[in-house]
Image: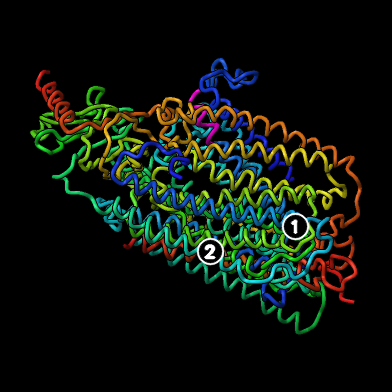
Amino acid sequence: MIVPYTTDVRPDTGLTNPKLGIWLFLASEVMLFGSLFSAYALLRSGDPAWPDQSTVVNVPLATLNTIVLISSSVTMVLAWASLTPALASRVTTGKAGAPATPLPLGRYRLFMGLTLLLGAVFLCIKAVEYSDKFSHGLLPSTNNFLGLYFTMTGLHALHVIGGMIVNAYLLGPGLKMWSSAPQRFANRVEVAGIYWHFVDVVWIFLFPVLYLL
Amino acid sequence: MLEWLGMPVAASAHAGQVDFIMVLVHWLMLVLFVGWSAFFFYVLVRFRRRANPVATHAGLQGSWSTWVEGGVLVAEVALLAFFSIPAWSARVDAFPAETQSTVVRVVAEQYAWNVHYPGADGRFGRTTLQLLGPDNPLGLDRADPTAKDDITTINQLYLPVDKPVIVHLSSKDMIHSFALPQMRVKQDVIPGIPQPVWFTPRQTGQWEIACSQLCGLGHYRMRGFYTIQTQAEYDAWLAEETALLATP
Amino acid sequence: MYAVTSLLFLLVGFLLILVIRWQLAYPGEPLPFLGELFGVANAPGGIILPEFYNQLGAMHGTIMVFLGVVPLAVGAFGNYIVPLQIGAPDMAFPRLNLASYWFYLAGGIVMLVSFFVPGGAANNGWTSYAPLSDLAPGMGQTLWLGGMGLLIFSSLLGAVNFITTIIQLRAPGLTWFRLPFFVWSQFITSFLLLLAFPALQAAAILQAMDRLAGTSFFLPSGLAVAGQALNVAGAGNALLWQHLFWFLAHPEVYVLILPAMGIVAEIIANNTRKPLWGYRLMVYSVFVLGFLSFIVWAHHMFLTGMGTTISAFFQATTMIISIPSVVILSSLILSLYGGSIRFTSPMLFALAFLPMFGIGGLTGLPLGLATTDIPLHDTNYVVGHFHYLVAPGTIFALFAGIYYWFPRVTGRMMNDTLARIHFVGSLICMNVIFMPMFIQGLAGVNRRLWDGGASYEHAQGVLALNIPMSHAAFTLGFFQLFFIVNLFVSVKRGRKVDANPWQATTLEWSPAGAPLRAYRDPYEYSVPGALTDFTPQGEAKP
């Protein structure tokens, strides 16, 4: 049984199924992180003894991490963009089905690899931050700020790990699809990219709220 | 209709108002339900297959259903604007002055109501977590001068009739709910968020304090008693308790 | 798969409440036959302990709502009927669909397993209010949180799948206002699942942190449990849980109800042989319901110390949300007018839904007004109110749906006589169980009491009602046997029927193999001048 619009755009909605799906999924993610941010606002406003956050957490490391994560978003876009000219050329030459000559993948491999690497760097820096907190006896149970700090950044880190697993799949075993269904593969990279940007955006909210304010 | 509803005796000044709204709402419900049901059963009989073998594609014409729905809306808005909101406002905004009221603290815990009277000086003594113990469930610091004359009881709340009462509620552990059914008083007691509640008893009698929020396995037995007395009886009780304080 | 699993969970949840009903009718008396099986820790000598009673109560609510009704209404009916009604070959993401089912099953198993861990299952009510749930000993509550996490994730995957399917896979010609009302109800339901559930996900994560990592998000400073000061950082907020919980759980109420309305609408159109009255109005109403359901949550919290302004806001939204419900209910009743009504077994359940849902909705009024909520809050009145909506309301609609679509699934009809016995018995029993709850609630009897309020003076006059209520519950169980037998026997021996036994119009009844395309509105029954009294949506214009 073939489900329509998995690869092609439905004309009257202008969407493919996976693209709509990922946007809906992200809408629910917005509500998840939104709930945590509201919890943060409520707890902070109700606690006169809330610590001065920037003295507790490591702002320079987090700034570095922000730059790392934004860069990884850029490389993700470049990875996707490296696929589209090949597709476009295939379309203009008008060949149907699988292309006779394999489409180039060098740039894609480079940028997707970089995205993965930057994700790993982000997690390593995060790990350094965490172990630094633990070694100073700063635990989630110390106070509600640290509790939320660990909960929210931890949940975000899980999202980063999830994204990296998908990206690794698209760089490794998932790459097979490029020769059989290139358009579908490019769509997958695009969808993974949308998710990856969302993870980035969450961090862009977490960073000021947990480190700077 | 009030007697059909079978609510507990209305023994406080605002209970009549609560009951009045209750009766109004139930009239509205009854009218709507009877109206709908009448139409419903009429239609079921009139348009059963045997009586009406061929359905009409167009169905019901006319706009009177809109009028009914509009009427429901108007009734609800009226209930809200003229009854419920003002009555609520009186409960939570229009607190009487403490000097003119009987003021008492009630501290809920699993599974008891600790009652704390300020005594003759009208001031509650200091309480602290460190002093908590089996004999001192409030953690009252008797060394504090304002605590010397404080009276404490467990599960027994005595109040004088015809004078406003302010109860300062707090909880030591879980969320409880302080319910005095005959006073039409109920207030969730939330740890960390002290809440006052006020009412004016109009009848003397002895009734029960019920916990209305699941607070653990003993929730069903978290029952206290409250006694509304005449001013003279209440004063006598206070004097007796104060005398007990002096004899250790 | 969904249907069978969720029906089993409904049965489990129902059996739990039968144990409770025994205890309420005969507090402290040993449960006959089965009592000893629960073990010494739960029911020594067959006498239900309060701890076990609270576990039963909490798990009854959780199982019925999250493992029974929602998976049956959305997972089973939605999954099976929606693609057929919109003429799609399958759901948009078949593999995601399977994943959603496995997450659901895993969540359900975690919930059931929790009965057997030390300390037993969660026993803090289905609402799991903190700090009680935060500080509850044993693993039960932690497993509850984990199980909820899995169930929520399952719902999210399902919701993404439904919305995508409905937007992307509608057959040619099936424009938005040609969608059957059932599809609309599933569409809005999916949005509620998608956007409301994450709030509970967040709350569950925070509570898990409180329980496992020692944080104090829901624990204010200065707590003392059993006379001992609690050793936590404090400064948390006990109401935070309630806000997050009800932000989910109020839309959840509509998740329970909207699919039921959808099913009832389908069956009424089919059995009156005429279009739904005010179809467009109903669609608009369901939109408004969905939207408003996100801004009424705090009407569950009037007595937490709410000021005039905020309570006025939530009372107002609560009254406003009753209007679209009234519109939908009225439209369904007015749809009967001018029809040629056939009292088939699905129609009986669908018709009974209307007044039962009406009672449930009307009794919401005094609870939605803050002042009248004072005496009624947390009494049996509340229990009666929402059970009327969900039990003779939604569950009747689900039965109606099963009887209606059974031939679509199996090619056979269910037995009509057994169905009618099932209907009459259930209708009477349901009312005998739930109607006295209003009387008890008005008398001030609180819910969730192990002895049903036997120790309270003000409960004495209405306590005896518990006995007929409980016997009606046991009898209700007996009448469900007619349904269960009917289900099993009809699969093998039901009367064989063709593709469209109800002579219905919507696309799921199209003959097999016909190209799926919609040419007209969904409920073109008794069109003047037509040869038959139904003109299928997929039938090409002559």
- Which residue occupies the foreground of this view, A137 or C49? C49
The residue at which mark 1 appears reads as B46
| Chain assignment, label 1 | B
Residue at 21% across / 40% down in the picture? B162
Residue A112 image position (x, y, % from top left):
60, 66
Residue at 88% across / 40% down in the picture? C492
Distance CA(mark 2)–CA(mark 1): 37 Å
- Quarter containing the C terminus of chain C: bottom right
- Which residue occupies the foreground of this view, B36 or C79? B36
Q: Secondary structure at mark 1?
A: helix
Magenta segment, prevailing SS (helix, strand or loop): helix
| Chain assignment, label 2 | C
- Which residue occupies the foreground of this view, C410 or C377? C377
Magenta span includes C542: no
Say which amino acid is labelled 1. Answer: Arg
Which mark is nearer the camera, 2 or 1?
A: 1
Which span is picked out in magenta? C49-58
| Category of crowding for the residue at label 2, using alpha-carbon neighbours closer than 10 angstroms: few (below 14), some (14–19), many (at least 20) | some
Residue A119 visible within the image: no
Residue A158 image position (x, y, % from top left):
52, 53
Q: Secondary structure at mark 2?
A: helix
| Category of crowding for the residue at label 1, using alpha-carbon neighbours closer than 10 angstroms: few (below 14), some (14–19), many (at least 20) | some
Question: Considering only vertical position in the picture, is A113 above or below C452?
Answer: below
Question: Considering only vertical position in the picture, is B242 above or below C107?
Answer: above
Q: Is residue C59 left or right of B85 when viewed as pictured?
A: right
Residue that sits furthest to the bottom in the current view: A92
The residue at which mark 2 appears reads as C291
- Which residue occupies the foreground of this view, B38 or C63? B38
Q: Are marks 2 and 1 in contact (CB under 8 Å)?
A: no
> Which corner quadrant of the image does residue C231 belong to?
top left
Residue B139 image position (x, y, % from top left):
21, 30
